[in-house]
Image (tube, helix red, strand yellow):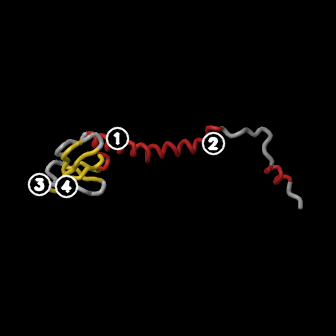
Amino acid sequence: MTFPTSFVMAQAAPAGAQAPNPIMTFLPLILLFVVFYFLMIRPQMKRQKEHRNMVAALAKGDEVVTNGGIAGKVDEVGESFITVEIAPNVKIKLQKGAVQQVLPKGTLKSS
């Protein structure tokens, strides 16, 4: 089976072919990393910083909600643990990092 001459010539590489630019080869990967940074990494770092500042600012009398959904009033603040009063004379000790949210004062009603 013979092929027309134009077909064979179309398949051959041109004599002065250049190698692709290495920057253009990695450009899609670079753009993908930039998109991931702005859509995923940067917002997560911002949330971590806000949580770290919130935990550092905990004080006695703050009303908090834990990651487990327990709401109570901070009774004692230590180096890495806090004591939360969840009912009259019922206190639990938690790690500071377990605090999910600080509620506005007066959210929890005292009994």
> Whole-Å distance between the Cαs marked 4 and 3?
10 Å
10 Å crowding of disc 1: few (<14), some (14-19), many (20+) = few
Left or right: 21 in relation to 40: right
10 Å crowding of disc 3: few (<14), some (14-19), many (20+) = few
Q: Which residue is mark 3?
A: 110
Q: Earlier in the sequence, mark 4 or mark 1?
A: 1
Amino acid on which disc 1 is placed: Lys
Instruction: Name the image quarter holding residue 81.
Output: top left
Q: Secondary structure at mark 4?
A: strand
Q: Earlier in the sequence, mark 3 or mark 1?
A: 1
Amino acid on which disc 4 is placed: Ile
Q: Secondary structure at mark 2?
A: helix
- Per the rendering, the mark at residue 25 is 2
Amino acid on which disc 3 is placed: Ser
Q: Which residue is mark 1?
A: 49
Left or right: 72 in relation to 6: left
Q: Of circles 4 and 1, which is in front?
A: 4
> Whole-Å distance between the Cαs marked 4 and 1?
27 Å
> Whole-Å distance between the Cαs marked 3 and 1?
32 Å
Measured from the top left, where is residue 95 in percent x and y?
30, 47
Q: Earlier in the sequence, mark 2 or mark 1?
A: 2
Residue pictured at 15% horizontal, 54% vertical: 89
Residue pictured at 66% horizontal, 38% vertical: 21
Q: Of circles 3 and 1, which is in front?
A: 3
10 Å crowding of disc 2: few (<14), some (14-19), many (20+) = few
Measured from the top left, where is residue 19 in percent x and y?
71, 39
Measured from the top left, where is residue 43 in percent x and y?
39, 45
Q: Which residue is mark 4?
A: 86
Amino acid on which disc 2 is placed: Thr
Front residue of 106/17: it is 106
Vertical comparison of 24 with 70: above or below = above
> Whole-Å distance between the Cαs marked 2 and 1?
36 Å
